Image (cartoon, grey):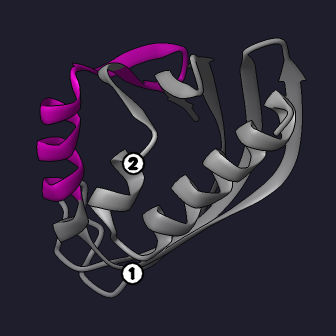
Amino acid sequence: MENRERYITVIENYISAYNRFDVKGMCRDLSEDILFENISDGNVDMSIKGIENFKKQTEAATAYFSERHQRIESWNFNNHVVTIEVSYQVTLAIDLPNGMKKGNMLTLKGISEFVFEDHEIISLRDIS
């Protein structure tokens, strides 16, 4: 399978697992040394190294939402880096300190950047 096709399959599987709250499925194609960063307004507000730390954070984050759906809007391929534009909608499962309440629905847009090496994701950056 050509790299581009493989990257599409891996990313679509990751997004599908994300939507199902399937942490094991999300981690299937991640490197043991995965670097995950969440970037908001140009600032890195979370940086996680290693698949075990990623699993812990991802499992903890599932408690925040009763529903979530991420949809890929566009793809950009640059060698071993794939950037997708996503829209996502989440329903809160808990009240948040910022005043948002359980049951509130959020609709957001963002970018996810996947870096591949040897058919594994070695870096994932969520940018909003």
Q: Quadrant of residue 99?
A: bottom left
Quadrant location of residue 32? top left
At label 2, which amino acid type do we have?
Arg
Tell me if I can see residue 97 in this picture.
no
Residue name at image x 39 percent, y 48 percent: 28
Name the residue nearer the viewer: 103 or 49.
49
- For badge 1, the amino acid type reads Asn
> Along the horizontal axis of the image, is 106 left or right of 66?
right
Residues at marks 2 and 1, CA–CA distance in whole angstroms: 31 Å
Which dot, 2 or 1, sits closer to the camera? Answer: 2
Magenta-highlighted residues: 35-61
Q: Residues within 10 Å of mark 1 (few under 14, many from 20)?
A: few
Q: Is residue 15 left or right of residue 92?
A: right
Question: Furthest residue to the bottom?
Answer: 103
Q: Whole-percent x and y of residue 108?
A: 61, 57
Residue 99 shows up from this direction: yes
Q: Residue at x 28, y 59 (%)?
A: 23
Q: Position of residue 120 (x, y in %)?
A: 51, 27
Check the picture and name the quadrant holding the N terminus: top right
Does the magenta portion include 97?
A: no
Q: Quick one: 95 or 115, which is closer to the camera?
A: 115
Q: Please state which of residues 82 and 63 is positioned toward the viewer in this rendering.
A: 82
* Residue underneath mark 2: 28
* Looking at the image, residue 42 lies above or below residue 66: above
Q: Which residue is mark 1?
A: 104
Q: Position of residue 109 (x, y in %)?
A: 68, 51
Count of picture labels: 2
Residue found 75% across the figure and 27% down from its top: 82
Image coords of residue 114 (percent x, y) = 61, 27
SS label for mark 2: loop
Kind of element beneath mark 1? loop
